[in-house]
Amino acid sequence: MTMHAPGTCPFCGGDLQVEALRCTDCRTRIEGRFDLLPFHRLSTAELRFLLRFLQHWGNLSRLAREMGVSYPTVRARYRELLETLGLEVTGEEEMPEGTSFLSPQEVLEALERGEISVDEALHRLGRKERHP
């Protein structure tokens, strides 16, 4: 099993910095001060979640079904992932429960399952106005 470099110190939680790199073929060694990518801050569970998210083309509803958890649970994990990566969480108000990546067929299926309202389905299908 491959070990991944931690992004934070296991003792104090501080940021880690890489000071040397070595080629596995020719053994060339490069020394300096290199910052880790934001992805190194992710825990193993967060990294697995990110990979699954990418495999599902960013579709949170499909990911929730595959993981066997509720949509709000997946959405909360996604929000935590963004925060861990230091990304600003934006557009949450505009992005209704589910995701803008849903196809028209998926919107209708979500409506049929009772996951979204008729108004929400109309909104996702391109009608921006909502009824009171």
Image (cartoon, rainbow, N blue to C red):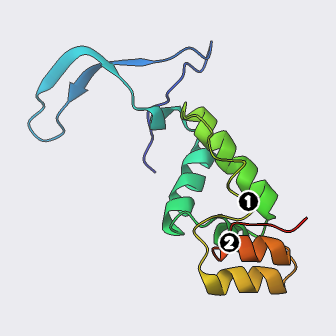
Residue 25 shows in the view: yes
What residue would you read off at disc 2? 124
Residue 115 falls left or right of residue 82: right
What residue would you read off at disc 1? 96
Disc 1, SS: loop
Q: In the rendered view, tell whether residue 112 sits above or below residue 44.
A: below
Looking at the image, which residue is at 63% across and 74% down? 126
Three-letter code, disc 1: Pro
Q: Position of residue 4 (x, y in %)?
A: 45, 39
Residue 9 falls left or right of residue 98: left
Residue 128 falls left or right of residue 56: right
Looking at the image, which residue is at 76% across and 61% down? 97
Q: Position of residue 109 (x, y in %)?
A: 74, 86
Camera-nearest residue between 41 and 101: 101
Q: Residues within 10 Å of mark 1 (few under 14, many from 20)?
A: few
Looking at the image, which residue is at 49% across and 30% down? 6
